[in-house]
């Protein structure tokens, strides 16, 4: 499909950001003027509270321009990658952003050097808006070096990302898979399909043909994976952190105890629940030996219906009723004001995201094809957009951006509410089983698998911190062991399991995966309480959505009644999983017995 | 063949280093004591000239132990890799060396901080032996940072070598080549053979099947190649060098003008000679279109005789007569004292090298199979060993080690003298043509191809210095252009030429390749003068061999009457090439016409 053949109401309206090219470049000029002004203030902005405020107001304004300009250019490029005008805008704003970053590199060091004075300014009422974000700057005190050292450390960025670059550049070819005597193409996308095949030979061949390539290049992957671990250890070390974990958690001001609590809950206390689920799969599928790659065989054969965009909105509006009229109106606005670019077409970026800033709507890009997954993606991305919309309308520009740490809550809550809605409206036991299975699989990926990843990643980080040399043998042996423990006694490990760690991009993201678990756990706890009619939880959750990035993430979650430092949250989430598992087990065993 | 079945006189005698394991560990203990002693002297060694001398004497002694221990362990491991006792010794000495390096990291910074005092001590007669090497330490003044900065820079070593690690780890598979309807295995070794095949289809298929794999992984190679360039640019920048070229030449104290002179002579002034040679090949082979991969087809079909070890020595002793009795006796000693491990056997390291230190003989490892190449390798390695022997017997332990920059002179002189000997003793025009062709091919690789590599490498380094982003497209386009200019108008570039840069490890060695050219140019000039009976040159050359590393490399070469900063050296070398080419052209055209 070509973009121009899509109805205008099914595309996003970016003219609300800038009506024409001229407006873009006018704002760019204003941004440049602000940068010059900030540079002129370098030697004076700490002199008194008025100059201090003026500097930060200018800086905030500059950020707003940059974000708006960037938003306009990148959204356009994602749907019209061959439009050279937008490409030029995009390159221009990226290069301007680099210029801003390097010209303002004096800022943090000067703030830290004058932290007593800054702390005093922050007591002033007129700086209230800036209090939290500037205290966040001061919190870095122990980890900001002298200007001379910071300059060298910042120069290392040119050499420190080779591991990730190589990982991204290394694309493998896979031998084909034989299905009913025919050769079929194997790649990341088709692997998932082959692993659902009823024929064990197909599953095994697909798994082997895929991961034997990772074994073939194991020394390259060992170099890049250990390389990225060494990079994180290097930065943690030179920036005076105890280790890579402490360095990574610092930005979100999260204690390491939270990280270990998630691992303890998922990998120790509640892991038997996952083993029980695996055992159930083995029983239903009636397999003597169940390999790790057999876990993807669908337990329920059911074809969901197809949805139009309007039908999706009808369902979504029904689902979000629970949040009240304000939230419902935001969803309506998304359709009316054309926040969303729905359909796939030639050249359009794949996947889905929500993106915007203080001075734009929270736009959504998706590739809608009308299946249940499209519906689920839509309510997921609308969760992000509603969160952004509420934050921007209740917080100042300085405090509206929420962090990744809490970003997946709103989207996952919506997605989970949707499944529950589908369960409530299921017209057969089979349909119900299908959605329960969907929910279970969703949960497993986020609350069981990611903490196993996090455990593995943490050990690699620890090795790097200790300067231990890391061979592919060490890495793959470790991953094999972690997987064997994870899947439990009912499941047999394939010989290639150890090499499958080389396929996962998230290990390059510096302690990222545990955030998925936190997001899902929080969402499950919230949803289970909302579905029980907990009004206090509803209010607290809506306030959380309005709070943006005005506090530390942990404090935001505490306010949302989901304190991630306490056991209750995890116990609620895993018990919710258990409830779903009980329900599913009952239905699926009934169904099997009636077959 | 098994090692134990080889006659004892054809293996090296390492018992001259240590008669048993006990002696190795006794020396290791002595080295550890010396390290403790040096650490105790940290705060006092700059106090007066006696303590200063004592510290350096201890340090020299420590170095001698380390070198001797390392030599013993690595030579043993290279012929008996499965002997765990030697592996343990090797790992032990490497880890001790790391410990020494990091415990003595205060040294350079303290020397620089006290450079006035050090300069004064060096005037003292009793420090004469140390004068040159310590002045070399002081010369680094501008490039040694504060201890705090040096510590951070030294920590970057953990993240800066990922590019080289990945390059080393990335092993490719190649599609087979069809020869006479049969599939033949393609790899680095067989590629060379296929490119000599008379069938143009075989040559093309081999070249394409080989280099299409580099194209397939071009983005990985672009990341690693640009990565290593960024690394060099980073270190040059933080260590206050003008650029990577200046940083690389600094250690040898070589002016950049020398680098550019080599490029100018080889890539501009004398390149027409190479084009003439290519045109001659095209004419003799009678090809309408000659591709770059066609240049390896042998112009002379001739089978050299087989040699025993003793026959090789007879020839070599004849060849080196020109240097007089002392040199001849060194070669005899090499046989008598069993410096050489001749034959290949299961597990033995491939290739050939000369290796030793002040307190050992200059041992040689080779894989002798009795062909002309074995003979040539033997005289080449004996060139290195004679150079080391003479240096160690005429210089103090501080000044005996010569640098890479001048290391290839002695070996290349010998190799070139050998070819001339073979020419003199040739019994037919065909044999003569064969050795002339050998010499020409040898020269082309070193005096024409390497300067083209150096030019390409220098442009990549310059891009990195300027922070220019480097895509594979940019890199391969550049390499294509450089090759087209290099091969000249008679030769047609294959579409894969641009990707062949990804195959070459030397681009990871930081301005290494021009040193090959210098070594060969110097050797050609020396040989051509020696063969003209130039007695002054002979004396100067022998003195050069005795001078070790007692002066700057350029000064050593000046003393050897081959001043690398003057045109004369290059003009002599390239004219010598021209003479050989003239002679070869005459013979080969005569031979063709009589066919």
Image (cartoon, coloured by chain):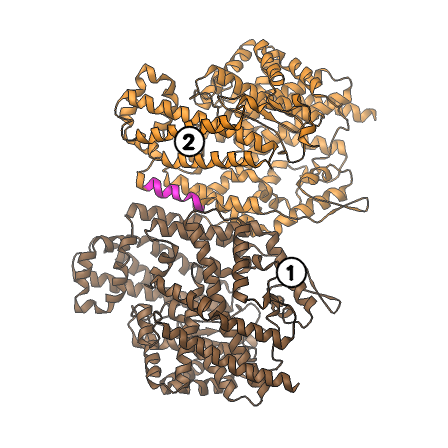
Chain colours: A brown, B orange
Q: Nearer the viewer, residue B243 or A421?
A: A421
Instruction: Estimate the x, y position of residue B116 in percent, counting from the top left.
Output: 27, 25
The residue carrying mark 2 is B250
Instruction: Estimate the x, y position of residue A222 in percent, counting from the top left.
Output: 53, 51
Badge 1: residue crowd in 10 Å (few <14, some 14–19, many ≥20): many
Q: Main secondary structure of the magenta part?
A: helix
- Side of B571 where B243 appears, left or right: left
The residue carrying mark 1 is A208
Residue at 75% across, 23% down: B306
Find the magenta span and give its range.
B149-159
Q: Nearer the viewer, residue B21 or A398?
A: B21
Instruction: Estimate the x, y position of residue A314 in percent, counting from the top left.
Output: 48, 87
Q: CA distance from mark 1 to mark 2?
A: 52 Å
Residue A323 visible in the shown view: yes
Residue at 22% across, 63% down: A54
What chain does mark 1 sit on?
A: A
* Residue B126, placed above or below residue A110: above
């Amino acid at each position: 499909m070509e973009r121009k053949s899509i109805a205008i109401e099914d595309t996003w309206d970016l003219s609300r950001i800038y009506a024409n090219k001229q407006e873009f470049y006018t704002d760019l000029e204003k941004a440049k003027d602000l940068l010059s002004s900030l540079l002129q203030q370098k030697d004076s902005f700490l002199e008194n509270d008025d100059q201090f405020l003026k500097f930060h107001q200018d800086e905030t304004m500059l950020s707003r321009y940059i974000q708006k300009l960037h938003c306009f250019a990148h959204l356009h490029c994602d749907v019209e990658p061959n439009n050279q005008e937008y490409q030029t805008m995009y390159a221009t704003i990226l290069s301007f952003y680099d210029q801003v970053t390097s010209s303002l590199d004096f800022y943090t060091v000067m703030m830290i050097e004058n932290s007593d004075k800054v702390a005093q300014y922050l007591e002033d009422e007129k700086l209230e808006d800036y209090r939290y974000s500037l205290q966040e700057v001061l919190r870095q005190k122990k980890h900001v070096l002298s200007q001379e050292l910071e300059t060298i450390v910042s120069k290392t960025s040119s050499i420190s990302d080779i591991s990730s670059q190589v990982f991204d550049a290394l694309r493998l070819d896979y031998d084909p898979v034989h299905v009913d005597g025919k050769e079929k193409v194997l790649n990341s996308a088709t692997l998932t399909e082959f692993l659902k095949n009823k024929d064990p030979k197909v599953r095994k061949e697909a798994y082997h043909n895929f991961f034997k390539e990772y074994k073939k290049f194991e020394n390259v992957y060992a170099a890049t994976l250990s390389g990225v671990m060494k990079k994180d250890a290097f930065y943690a070390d030179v920036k005076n952190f105890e280790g890579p974990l402490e360095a990574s958690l610092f930005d979100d001001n999260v204690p390491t105890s939270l990280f270990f609590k998630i691992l303890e809950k998922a990998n120790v206390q509640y892991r038997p629940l996952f083993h029980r689920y695996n055992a159930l799969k083995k029983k239903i599928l009636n397999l003597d030996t169940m390999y790790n790659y057999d876990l993807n065989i669908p337990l329920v054969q059911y074809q969901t219906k197809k949805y139009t965009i309007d039908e999706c909105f009808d369902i979504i509006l029904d689902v979000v009723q629970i949040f009240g009229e304000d939230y419902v109106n935001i969803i309506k606005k998304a359709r009316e004001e054309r926040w969303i670019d729905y359909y796939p077409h030639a050249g359009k970026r794949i996947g889905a995201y929500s993106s915007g800033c203080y001075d734009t709507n929270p736009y959504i890009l998706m590739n809608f094809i009308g299946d249940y997954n499209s519906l689920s993606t839509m309510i997921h991305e609308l969760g992000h957009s509603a969160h952004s919309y509420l934050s921007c309308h209740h917080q100042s520009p300085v405090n509206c951006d929420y962090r990744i740490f809490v970003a997946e809550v709103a989207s996952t809550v919506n997605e989970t509410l949707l499944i529950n809605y589908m369960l409530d409206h299921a017209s057969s036991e089979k349909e119900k089983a299908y959605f329960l299975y969907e929910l279970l699989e969703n949960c497993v990926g986020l609350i069981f698998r990611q903490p196993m990843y996090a455990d593995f990643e943490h050990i690699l980080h620890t090795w790097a911190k200790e300067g231990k040399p890391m061979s592919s043998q060490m890495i793959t042996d470790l991953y094999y062991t972690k997987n064997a423990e994870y899947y439990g006694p009912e499941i047999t490990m394939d010989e290639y399991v150890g090499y499958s760690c080389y396929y996962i991009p998230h290990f390059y993201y510096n302690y990222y995966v545990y955030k998925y678990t936190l997001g899902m756990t929080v969402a499950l706890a919230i949803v289970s309480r909302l579905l029980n009619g907990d009004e206090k939880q509803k209010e607290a959750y809506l306030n959380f959505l309005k709070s943006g990035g005005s506090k530390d993430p942990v404090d935001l979650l505490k306010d949302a009644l989901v304190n991630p430092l306490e056991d209750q949250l995890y116990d609620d989430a895993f018990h919710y999983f258990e409830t779903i598992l009980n329900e599913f087990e009952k239905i699926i065993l009934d169904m099997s017995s009636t077959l």
